[in-house]
Image (cartoon, rainbow, N blue to C red):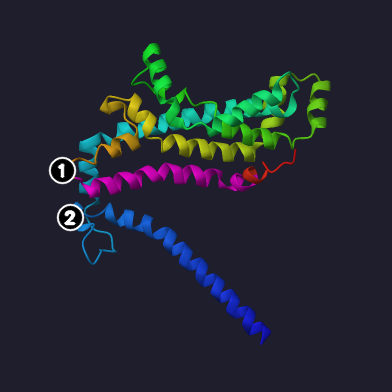
Amino acid sequence: MIHSKKLSTKIGIYCLLIAGVLLSIAPFYWMLVGSTLPSGEIFRLPPKLLPGDYLAKNFQSLNESLGFAKIFWNSLFIALVYTLVSTLISSMAGYAFAKFTFKGKNLFFFIILCTLMIPSQVTLIPLFEMMVTFNWLNTYQAIILPTLASPFAIYLMRQNMKSVPDSIIEASRVDGAGELKIFFTVILPVTRPAMAAVAIFLFMSQWNSLLWPLITLNSKEMFTLPVALSSLIGMARIDYGQLMLGTTLSTVPIMIFFLLLQKHFISGILGGAVKE
């Protein structure tokens, strides 16, 4: 009796989990199917649940409308450069706040945390005026540079680096290693899971960024994917086939990036749970 009750409970849990997985996958599957259909068939009733034969036509139309290869390269270049440089800056800042003692350290860290509570919309006008002053409008650096020092990434790296034993650092200093050598050869290999988690977060935030690139970029050949896809939504007509295909293709790099770093992701997030 007890065994059958446990079995029933387990079956019920598995059914709920399977239902949750299906609900999560359904929008992505519908997006994939929609990218293979002409615009007029995507919202028909009953809905078509099997892929069509309009994929090549949709891609041709999408490429003619946006110049997809150039747009894709813009997004990929910006996201990768931003992720690499911002991860390095955040790691250095986290290391300084975790392992160095200097005047005002806690105050500076508190100020960094306070910036998390400032809405990004508040900074748009000052940042735009800075880009105009530097003559950086419609350039890659206008998208990459303003948010390189991510407060959340600095916080996460600082929390992870607090778990690194001070004895390892002191031993390296006794051996004559400089601070940069200690950082690159001792600290970074130990905190690789945290860096992977930070890299995923930064890549996704930059890849999906819309508002700031929309304000800063004014030529079609410099558009990123979110900006370019938003331009497909017109006042009179929306080609949903193109939009579905563009959205589908824009999710591929995020999935690849996450799959490459997923084994480090959970351990990196949990590594931030260090008691003060």
Q: Residue at x 51, y 26 (%)?
A: 148
Disc 2 residue type (three-letter):
Gly
What SS does tag 1 mark? loop
Residue reaching furthest to the left: 236
Asked if residue 276 lies left or right of residue 40, the reply is right
Is residue 16 toward the left or the right of residue 218 in the image? Answer: right
Residue 47 within the segment the image draws in magenta: no
Q: Please give the name of the residue rendered at 55% of the width and 29% of the height, measured from the top-left corner.
A: 115
Which residue is the site of mark 1? 236
Which residue lies at the image location 34% right of the left edge and 48% below the top edge?
A: 248
Please state which amino acid type lies under the numbered disc 1. Ala
- Please state the extent of the stretch shown in magenta in the rendering: 238-267
Q: Position of residue 210 (x, y in %)?
A: 37, 35
Please indicate, yes or no, whether residue 87 appears anywhere in the rendered image: no
Q: CA distance from mark 2 to mark 1?
A: 15 Å
The residue tagged 2 is 40
Residue at image x 20%, y 40%?
A: 234
Q: Looking at the magenta stretch, what is its main secondary structure?
A: helix
Q: Quadrant of the N terminus?
A: bottom right
Residue 164: x, y in percent? 75, 35
Of the image marks 2 and 1, the number of the one nearer the N terminus: 2
Q: Are marks 2 and 1 in contact (CB under 8 Å)?
A: no
Asked where in the image residue 190 lies, by quadrant, the reply is top right
